[in-house]
Amino acid sequence: MKIFDKIKKQINNNSIIIYMKGSPDMPNCGFSARAVKILLSYKKKFSYVDVLKNEKIRKFLPKYSNWPTFPQLWINGVLIGGCDIIVEMFNNGELKKIISKVN
C-alpha cells in the first residue's frame, strides 16, 4: 500500500486521530502533550499515530496535509490543525462543538 493511501485510510477510518510524537501515555514533546491533554479532557475515543515510530508517515503526512508540523489533529476526515490551533479552539469552545458531533 502506498503511504498516501495508508494515511488516507487511517484518517477515514478514525473519527478522531492525532498524529503526534510519542503516545497519549508518553508524549515525546510538549506540543503533543498539550494537544493530547485537551483531547483526553473530552473523554471521547480517539486514535493516534506515533510519528517517531513511523518514519514514512512522519515524512509524507506534511505533504499530504500541507501542514508542516506535528501534532496534527484530524476529525471526521478534516485537518483541524496543530497544537496552537487546538489550544485556541479549546479555549473558545469551537473544538468542543466539533468533538461533540463525533459518534
Image: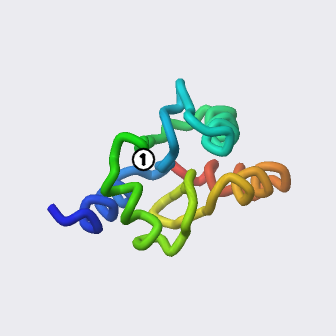
Which residue is painted at 69% across and 33% down in the image? 41
As rendered, which of 7 and 39 lies closer to the eye? 7
Q: Residue at x 48, y 40 (%)?
A: 46
Q: Does the image show residue 5?
A: yes
From the top left corner, tell me how far across and down residue 3 is, in percent.
25, 63
In this view, which residue lies farthest toward the right? 92
Helix, strand or loop at mark 1: loop
**Which quadrant holds residue 37?**
top right
Name the residue: 42% across, 72% down. 63
Q: Residue furthest top?
A: 25
Q: Relative to residue 52, is residue 56 drawn left or right?
A: left
Whether residue 42 is visible here, answered yes or no, is no
Q: Position of residue 72 (x, y in %)?
A: 55, 56
Q: Is residue 58 left or right of residue 28?
A: left
Please state which amino acid type lies under the numbered disc 1.
Answer: Val
Q: Residues within 10 Å of mark 1 (few under 14, many from 20)?
A: many
Tell me how the rendering is colored: rainbow
Q: Is residue 100 above or below residue 3?
A: above
The quarter of the rendered structure image containing the N terminus is bottom left
Depicted 19 relative to depicted 36: above or below: below
Single out the residue that lies furthest toward the left. Answer: 1
Name the foreground residue: 50 vs 90: 50
Residue 43 falls in which quadrant of the image?
top right
**Which residue, given by chain and number where applicable, does mark 1 sit on?**
51
Q: How many marks?
A: 1
